[in-house]
Image (cartoon, rainbow, N blue to C red):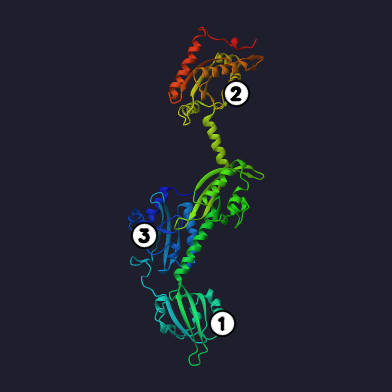
Amino acid sequence: MADQQMMKPEDRDAVLAAVVAKEPDAFIAAIGPNGLFVPMPPEVAALGLRPIDGASSMLGLAVTEDHRLIIDTWIKVVAEGAAGCPVHLTAAPDRPARINFVDATHRFGVYLGIVSGSGLSAELALDPELVRPRMVTMVKNPTSVVTDVGPEIDPLLGWSPAQLIGQRTLELVHPDDQERAITSWLDMIGTPSGSARRVRLRHLHRNGHTVWFEVTNHNYLADPENPRVVAEMLDISDEMAAQEAVRAAEQLMRRLTETIPLAILQAGHDGGITFLNEQAARHLRAQIGDALAETVLDLVEPADRAVVAGALAGVLTGQDTDLEYGRREPGAGTRRIRANLRALTDDSGAVTGAIACLADVTEEALLRERLWRQATFDALTGCHNRAATMAALDEALGAADRHAGTAVIFLDLNSFKPINDRYGHAAGDLLLSQVSVSLRGAVPPGAIVGRIGGDEFVAVCRDVAGPEHADRIGADLLAALSAARVRVAGDTLVPQASLGVAWSAYGENDPEELMARADAAMYAVKRTRGGRQSTIDSLLLT
């Protein structure tokens, strides 16, 4: 299953169109993600197929022996997008039929189940019978031979009373239930006269399908004039089908949870684990009855414990939560876990428990971190890149928490090109790296340093009281550069820069304008250097 790929939407549409075109008399039902029928969207009804009424799922249309095959096919369609299987319908068990499932959630918001087959006539209906008796009384002699039976036996089992009189009732019982029938009969005949024993047995309809009865045998064998057993047979097929549907749905859920690489746990209203799949049992070392909160919190990183504990407590009061946290994995270091917590409620809205779905997203988190760093920082210097610098400036100017103001300090290195020409680009890269280290160490807390060009750096500082404060920060940055030393080819270089400062009060200016002001101030400083071109000798420490 893990190797299968979900079909593309257009391929699923093609499968649906082919089935509809080939089987215009087919039956159709809309199906929810849990496998149960849901109201049919108008667009599905417009396909022209006959709607299925009176059933809750495809399991309700097929004989019991086909339920496992239908479940396996449903699991396949959820994973792949389309699947089908042959079935025997309870309405026509001797006619060839097929169920085709198609994932049409991309188009109609539902899955589709289409029942078709060359043996299904246009007149065939899958609707349930409107009037059907549920009980029949049968009289048996001491050897369990039928001596009398009510007329309700015909619609219930397909036999007329005359056809059953003189027959042993054991012949009507499903072979798998005959041993239980014999045991119940022997238990009943050993009871005092007038006593009764009840047993649930499957009986065979004349056409071969199975009917469940709850049989209550009343012992009147001690009656000297008419020794007999009077059996009240109540049709409980609907109840047993409902139980089977629940069992099948539970099996479907369990099998689905084992096909996905997630740890899934269900807890009751008291927080105790009532279900967990193999992934959860293996990775969390948990079992039924353990406390969900203690199980999940066992290896959570201390910094995340309070948040995770709050989310686990909140989901049991109805608060759905999605979060990530760190978990210590013995022998594997710290892993990142994504938790999706969902409350379970009853029809009145009261919380009855919770579902926790845990996924190891360590590789995803590392990839996110790597992509974020690539999108945020300059690879050579470790400073913010131009886009990230402008984003930080925009955030500082529009911060929700009011502060004194924002300063932009623009630095352009002097005589950088001659360094590349004389010592090579490796030396230039070394100088740029040293400049970035010096600047980042000199800016105030909360400030960022960005490299926005080859030898151009910008410091963005928030909560700066005014222009004088901004000028002092600029002076600190120049002092930090003058204290830096780079040893290259036997020479010691001291980085120098022209610097421009611009300041904006909180709520004033936009990022581009403030940056332009700092840039203009920097070029004004360059022009005051006498118009002469600085030479590399001015950078050498003598």
Q: Quadrant of residue 481?
A: top right
Indicate whether 397 appears above or below 138: above
Q: Nearer the viewer, mark 2 or mark 1?
A: 2
The answer to whether residue 459 is left or right of residue 49 is right
Check residue 37 in the rendering and tell me which mark sits there, or answer none. Answer: none
Q: Nearer the viewer, mark 2 or mark 3?
A: 2
Name the N-terminal-most of marks 3 and 1.
3
| Residue annotated with mark 1 | 186
Q: Amino acid at mark 3?
A: Glu
Residue 318 seen? yes
| Residue annotated with mark 2 | 441
Indicate whether 478 appears above or below 249: above
Mark 2: give few (<14), some (14-19) or many (20+) Cα within 10 Å. Answer: few
| Residue annotated with mark 3 | 23
Residue 336 seen? no
Residue 18 drawn at (x, y percent): 38, 54
Badge 3 marks a residue whose secondary structure is loop
Report how far apart the C-alphas of labels 2 and 1 lie in the structure: 94 Å
Name the N-terminal-most of marks 2 and 3.
3
Mark 1: give few (<14), some (14-19) or many (20+) Cα within 10 Å. Answer: few
Residue 449 drawn at (x, y percent): 54, 24
